[in-house]
Amino acid sequence: MPAVNETIEAVQSVTESTYKWGFETDIEMEFAPKGLNEDIVRFISAKKNEPAWLLEWRLRAFALWKTMETPLWAAVKHPPIDFQDSYYYAAPKEKVGPKSLDEVDPELLKTYAKLGIPLREQEILAGVEGAGSTPAEGRMPIAIDAVFDSVSVATSYKERLGKEGIIFCSISEAVQEHPDLVKKYLGSVVPQGDNFYAALNSAVFTDGSFVYIPKGVRCPMELSTYFRINAKSTGQFERTLIIADAGSHVSYLEGCTAPMRDENQLHAAVVELVAMDDATIKYSTVQNWYPGDAEGKGGIYNFVTKRGACRGARSKISWTQVETGSAITWKYPSCILQGEDSVGEFYSVAITNNYQQADTGTKMFHIGPRTKSTIVSKGISAGHGQNTYRGLVRIGAKATGARNFTQCDSLLIGDLCGAHTVPYIENRCMSAKVEHEATTSRIAEDQLFYCRQRGLTQEEAVGLIVNGFCREVLKELPMEFAVEAQKLLQISLEGSVG
Amino acid sequence: MLRIEGLSAEIDGKEILKGIDLEVPTGEVHAIMGPNGSGKSTLSYVLSGREGYEVTGGTATLNGVDILAMEPEERAAAGLFLAFQYPVELPGVGNATFLRTALNAVRKGRGESELDAMQFLKVARQRMKALSMPEDMLKRGVNVGFSGGEKKRNEILQMAMLEPSMAILDETDSGLDIDALKIVSDGVNAMRGPGFSALVITHYQRLLDYIVPDRVHVLMGGRIVKSGGPELAHELEAQGYGAIQEGLPSKHRFDGGEAAA
Amino acid sequence: MTTAVATGAAGFLARFEGLKDHLPGARKPWLNTLRADAAAHFAARGFPTRRVEQWKYTDLGAVAQAHFTEPLTMVEGAIALPVANAPDRAVFVDGRFRADLSMLAGLPYRAVGLAQHLDEAEAQLGALAKPQHEPLAALNTMLFEDGLFIDVPAGIDGGLLELVSIALDPGRPFAFHPRHLIRLGAGASLTLIETATGRGQCLHNPVFEITVAEGATLTHGRLLQEEATVFHLSTIYATIAAGGTYDNFTVAAGPRLTRNEIHAALTGPRATCHMNGAQMAAEGQHVDTTTSLDHAAPDCASRQTYKTVLTGRSRGVFQGKILVRREAQKTDGYQMNQALLLSEDAEIDSKPQLEIYADDVKCSHGATVGALDADSLFYLRARGIPESQAKAMLVEAFLHEAVETVTDETLRAALTRALDSWWQRQGAAAA
């Protein structure tokens, strides 16, 4: 099987050099003392000038966390994490909190430009001062919240969005400016004690995005958050909260990168979504945290809790994720389908190469009548990568006429990797219908040969076939992200920087 | 004979049939034509008693008996047969078992004696031969792995076996090549006679070259908007449904005339 | 001798302490060691709770709480036997082999009671079972009193054999833990039909250790038809060598709680394993099929089809794992589990699972859960078939589909009878 061997070689040739986001920004930082205790929680809360209720909320989470144990059920292996050997607060010096772009450290702007997130350029091109902007090159403008280590450094298009009554800001700012909304919804989908990492996040979260779309408003542009871990020995604990009021519609994107380091850094985020009657939230992620080097050294531990509540009738929450980065990914974006006729979707591509491990999937809780969910998961394993789909479809006794369809496909490239599928189906409702299908295979020799006979190189052929394999998921992404994601897939697998 | 008066029906609160008046006298074959979405299939399902279709007004009687209050199997026993547009596949249910169970259920309803396995097979083989159906079709699961043409022939076989007094053929011509169309039509024509009526639902005139109807009705927007002799089908083929629509007062137009009315 | 603690793991352990000098083979050191090790594992783990992943959906609380005792003494005299499915048969009453009721004369292979032939079985007893992983296998190893020992020499076609297990109701809760050892030599074949009937409050906890050598074929049909007071917890370990076939078909329809747990390993190239079954539960019953298939060699194939039908307040569980090891290239694995819910109060939990480490494989699984298809029901009714009869036809068709894969006609007929009689009982109960 020479073709296969070549594929494997191509894959093995991927080394840390292909991670082009691995640079470090030299910028003066302010840190909290290393380690984790009640004082650190108080320090973070004080630094952010938080109201007393939020400090209490954090302390309660911390107390819960101390009683909890690291989850062991996922098919991932890592040495025990020393939670005392990390900084829980790291922020670029100067000012804390959001500011106008003119005040942002030029080093930071450069960093984002280098990452392909031109905060300033976009702002200027779209002409934020003059409302009713003409997007450059006919593109939809994208409003961006940029989170650098522990804090949000800039949020664009705020004024334009404000005119529609849309709130898009960092969560720190929301705590100050919209405390009632934050107090009402924070922890309402992912309670503090939900799981070990959610409890940790609730105690020490530093920043993240906050979105509120008022009744009946269709958000006129994509909202986006760009997460960057830069500082050494820090954990990033972002918290995102999106509320779509009745009849509203929003599409939200997030991207993430980090420098290349030999140490493992922890990213433990919590994302909560709330959709009221007839509201739609589309949440897309392209996760490209540093995956570690070819020997499995370094990389981000991406332990994330994401959950959406379809509270209202006919509401819809759609998760799309492309997971190419991180040494370990542990995340299960889920939907609680309470409102009648509400809809949950989960579209996922996860690639593990070298020594990456991913244990990811979703949970669909069907509570209301006629609720529907669709799950499409594509796992690709290469090198020594281990890739697990883990999912739960639970249909309660009152979810009459509920419907679920799940399709999980795995692709193996090389014989040192693993692909695993662990679905749980629990049905207590006679009139519900659940269908689950899963397949595991490798790239077929005849497909490869066909492509090569038509003139494609081995790498191109693999890239093409993998992209085809992921098409159902990629087509769910907003245009620009889809292009980016396709490139990422290619890079993750081929070793030829696009 | 089938008599329908002011029949209205809705699905999920959406009104599809808006007062149908139609009479198919015993021994006659009538055709219902209409564009997609006009309510043709809904009419066949309402008459045969499918769940999810709510009758909101009007009556339908078969040979003087109100059928709307009956269960689907009671309607079948009363002589009503629906040839499905999309015959359902029943994996694991043998065609022979199915046919014999259905036949005996209907015979019982008519006060006739049940057929034993030998009697049944004799009749079935005879009918299948007439429809050019291979005998191994009896051993297979109902409609499982059948081609589109085989499924439609299977519907006609069932009709021939059950000997209904009123058959509704819902787009039986869809997906048939010319040979299959001829076989199916011959099967229907063979049943024509004083004790048999049929309602042939179709989108195209083609089928009506083979099963020549006594009357043609045009269904649009949930109502019968025009009736005539067999020549009406040719008229429609030549001019399309748009022509008829244009000739109608706005309250009978289905493309927005409702809102204006 | 009565002890204060009579229930749960402690109850079984206490009785083991009291009985260990009286159990079959009590003077054989190797067996004493085996039993003592198993007792240590059972003491360490106890009955699995629902916090144990493999027991997430099946609660053994009722088993743990019952005051079981082991029968130890043999019931003698004539008893009514179920209708025979084969002329050759081995009969067990309350877990003890009854030579007087069995018909095993003139067989071209060995089929004997284990208690009387322990020395012959030394190499095989405990070779496959994993008491360290499965507490019920530990319980069985600790307390087994008898079982069937089958040894089919190489090249011999053993034909058809029936294993009849009957539990009589002694009027108090009792438990028996038969240990069955089956070995097929290279190229040998055997069809084993197992019928389990029983009544009273009893725990039937059999463990099978099955070895299928190169090119051998074992067809193993199981009809678990004990009454709704019985707990049936069976664990099967099977290893299949190159070119061998193990074909298991289980109908579980009767006991209050059934756990049908199968661990099969394909250890040589081109080995095949079929695991199929139909499980049904009515009011108050719980059925659980848990399979684990280990593809440890290249070019092997496995097929699984399980059907579950639930009525009344009942619960069904299917857990099936396919493991494909790195060396198991060209594996062809397929698994399907389908459940039909006929009641608003029924619950089905399903967990199919793939764990794959080889790249040149074709593995898939599918699961469907739902009520009877409304379109099919309407189609039948539109042809004049009354609703109840239409439902019966569809349920039968659903169940019979699983049996279609069984090639042995005697076995297929027995399985079909078991399916139909269950459904007829449901119809009678509903009417």
Image: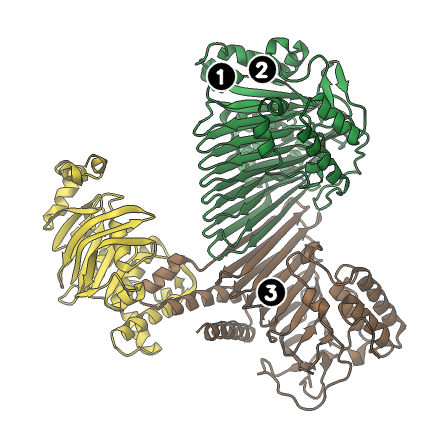
Name which of mark 2 and mark 1 comes first in the sequence: 2
Hue used for the chain lettered C: brown
Residue A33 - label: none
Q: Amino acid at mark 2?
A: Leu
Q: Nearer the viewer, residue A195 or C29?
A: A195
Name the spot of residue B40 as percent of width and height, x first.
Answer: 24, 49
Chain to which mark 2 belongs: A
Q: Nearer the viewer, residue C203 or C260?
A: C203
Hue used for the chain lettered A: green
Mark-to-mark CA distance, 2 and 1: 15 Å
Q: Mark 1 or mark 3: which is in front? A: 1
C209 vs A248, left or right, is right
Query: Which residue position is annotated with label 3?
Result: C287
Chain to which mark 1 belongs: A
Name the spot of residue B252 as percent of width and height, x first.
Answer: 17, 40
The chain assigned the colour yellow in the figure is B
Name the spot of residue A146 as percent of width and height, x first.
Answer: 62, 20
Q: Is residue A363 above or below residue C312?
A: above
Q: Quadrant of the N terminus of chain A?
A: top right
Identified at 77% across, 68% down, the residue is: C139
Q: Amino acid at mark 3?
A: Val
Mark-to-mark CA distance, 2 and 3: 59 Å
Name the spot of residue A100 as percent of width and height, x first.
Answer: 60, 12
Query: Which residue position is annotated with label 1?
Result: A160
Q: Amino acid at mark 1?
A: Arg
Q: Residues within 10 Å of mark 3 (few under 14, many from 20)?
A: many
Identified at 70% across, 88% down, the residue is: C100
Query: SS of the residue at dot 2?
Result: helix
Chain to which mark 3 belongs: C
Residue B191 position by quadrant:
bottom left
Q: Is residue A325 above or below residue C269?
A: above
Residue A119 - label: 2
